[in-house]
């Protein structure tokens, strides 16, 4: 056990090339998915927050529920969509990093949209009278608030990033864990553990945790600096 | 130019949660005079001004302005102003942008408005870190930039110290001098006397008394308003 820890650390510090390829792909896939989900999820959440339409309560409940989507189920649906006989089969995306980005975007979108919806709705309560007095309509009001609370929304984006970087089920199914093509940290850890190569699995585990902590620390610093600056 | 005044309230009522807050009120507000709305907590002052300003929809009756495009020609300053998380200058620029002012003119007009309320030195400061009095002056600068024909003020100095209150009152006088109609609620009788031309006294959602300031003080003609001015509790 101690040996496994030691050689796991050794693999990290010796910059095993294979390991770093896997780390790089993991980051590329998860960050791409989070960027896409942010671009779609923030406006969606804001629109639901300030919108007044029939079935709004139902949409909110559904969106909150979708935060808990099981990754393997999402993976299965995307697999069916992208498989040769599926509706999007002609794109030939199955077992590619693009398919993994697609699946993770679907997983992360409800998290970012639901948390943004809550944050914008709380802010709207504070801003509404002032903005309406100025003649600001709902759409512009939503965009104004999104921009005004952008640093608080970092928390929603981080929650999405946590989900994307930690999940294994969806990327395993649509990516296929192909060595050198679609193998990422979580699928590699699952594989190496089942093969019994604990040092590599542990090394990857250390890197994964370190990356997540580093990203969260950076976001925290940005948020703190912004709060000091803008109040 | 045809103004949006006079403003007519016709049989105006407002109820919320089964409680009537404004009851069948008829009022006409003319240009040129500063109108102070007085009344105890819960008398309906804030709600009445929000009905006039269009932030609340009446349960019954009508709010009738005399001109067109009335939204752009009135402004409101709230007891607690809401500032955007950007500089003081950018807060005024935002208002001008929403109002459809050309991008080329916004910065100049915003700086003029800040100068009017004495905030030139603080133009580049984030609005949310300004003091309460400074934020309220910034709220007045936002209104000033729009050159409204009517300015509603809902207890604008309720949370401020005497120094800040004096500064706010000076700006309100400047609005009055520039031809803007002032409609203000306050709890301060001294402020009412300093700034008002006439008083509307609200009691339980109705206009109990309306009088020129020199008639209302020192002794109003109705017993409710009389009790309020004497500092007695109107429900005892």
Image (tube, coloured by chain):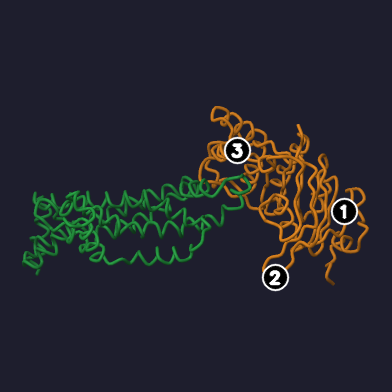
Chain colours: A green, B orange
* Residue that badge 2 annotates: B18
Q: Which chain does tag 1 point to?
A: B
Dividing the picture into quarters, in which one does residue A189 lie? bottom left
Question: What whole-number distance in Å separates the C-alpha atoms at marks 3 and 1?
Answer: 34 Å
Question: What whole-number distance in Å separates the C-alpha atoms at marks 3 and 2?
Answer: 36 Å
Horizontally, is A228 left or right of A161 in the view?
right
Instruction: Name above or below for residue A222 compared with residue A191.
Output: above
* Disc on res. B99: 3
Q: Position of residue A160 (x, y in %)?
A: 32, 57
> Going 27% across and 50% down the picture, which residue do you hit?
A31
> Going 24% across and 59% down the picture, which residue do you hit?
A78
Front residue of B162/B154: it is B154
Quadrant of image for the C terminus of chain B: bottom right
Say what secondary structure mark 1 lies in: strand
Q: Which chain does tag 3 point to?
A: B
Q: Which chain does tag 2 point to?
A: B
Mark 1 on the same chain as mark 2? yes
Question: What whole-number distance in Å separates the C-alpha atoms at marks 1 and 2?
Answer: 28 Å
Mark 2 neighbour class, 10 Å CA radius: few under 14, some 14 to 19, many 20 or more: few
Mark 1 neighbour class, 10 Å CA radius: few under 14, some 14 to 19, many 20 or more: many
* Disc on res. A27: none
Horizontally, is B167 left or right of A171 in the view?
right
> Going 82% across and 39% down the picture, which residue do you hit?
B32
Front residue of B136/A179: it is A179
* Residue that badge 1 annotates: B210
Say what secondary structure mark 3 lies in: loop
Say what secondary structure mark 2 lies in: loop
Q: Position of residue A12 (x, y in %)?
A: 12, 54
Quadrant of image for the N terminus of chain B: top right
């Amino acid at each position: 056990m101690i040996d496994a820890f030691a050689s796991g650390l050794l693999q990290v510090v010796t910059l095993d090339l294979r390991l770093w390829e896997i780390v790089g792909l993991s980051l590329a896939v998860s960050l791409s998915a989070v960027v896409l989900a942010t671009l779609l999820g923030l406006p969606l959440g804001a629109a639901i927050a300030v919108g007044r339409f029939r079935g709004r309560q139902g949409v909110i409940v559904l969106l909150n529920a979708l935060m808990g989507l099981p990754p393997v189920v999402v993976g299965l649906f995307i697999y069916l969509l992208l498989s040769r006989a599926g509706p999007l089969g002609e794109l030939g995306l199955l077992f590619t990093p693009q398919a993994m980005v697609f699946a993770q975007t679907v997983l992360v979108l409800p998290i970012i949209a639901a948390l943004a919806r809550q944050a914008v709705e709380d802010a709207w309560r504070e801003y509404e009278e002032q903005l309406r007095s100025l003649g600001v309509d709902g759409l512009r009001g939503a965009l104004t608030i999104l921009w005004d609370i952008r640093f608080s929304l970092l928390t929603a984006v981080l929650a999405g990033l946590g989900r994307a970087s930690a999940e294994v089920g969806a990327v395993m199914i649509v990516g296929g864990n192909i060595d050198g093509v679609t193998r990422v940290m979580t699928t590699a850890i699952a594989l190496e553990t089942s093969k019994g190569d604990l040092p590599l699995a542990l090394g990857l585990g250390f890197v994964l945790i370190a990356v997540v902590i580093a990203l969260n620390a950076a976001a925290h610093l940005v948020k703190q600096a912004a709060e000091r600056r803008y109040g | 130019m045809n103004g949006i005044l006079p403003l007519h309230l016709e049989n105006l009522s407002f109820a919320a949660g089964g409680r009537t807050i404004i009851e069948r009120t008829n009022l006409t507000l003319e240009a040129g005079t500063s109108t102070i709305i007085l009344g105890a907590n819960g008398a309906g002052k804030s709600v009445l001004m929000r009905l006039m300003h269009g932030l609340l929809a009446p349960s019954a009756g009508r709010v009738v302005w005399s001109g067109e495009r009335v939204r752009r020609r009135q402004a409101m300053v709230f007891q607690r102003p809401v500032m955007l998380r950007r500089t003081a200058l950018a807060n005024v620029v935002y208002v001008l942008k929403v109002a459809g002012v050309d991008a080329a003119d916004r910065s100049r007009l915003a700086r003029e408005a800040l100068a009017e309320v004495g905030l030139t030195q603080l133009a580049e400061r984030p609005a949310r870190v300004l003091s309460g009095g400074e934020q309220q002056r910034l709220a007045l600068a936002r209104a000033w930039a729009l050159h409204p024909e009517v300015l509603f003020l809902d207890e604008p100095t309720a949370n401020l110290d005497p120094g800040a209150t004096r500064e706010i009152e000076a700006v309100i006088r400047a609005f009055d001098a520039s031809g803007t109609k002032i409609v203000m609620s306050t709890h301060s009788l001294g402020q009412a006397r300093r700034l008002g031309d006439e008083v509307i006294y609200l009691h339980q959602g109705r206009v109990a008394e309306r009088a020129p300031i020199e008639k209302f003080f020192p002794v109003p003609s109705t017993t409710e308003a009389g009790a309020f001015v004497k500092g007695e509790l109107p429900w005892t």
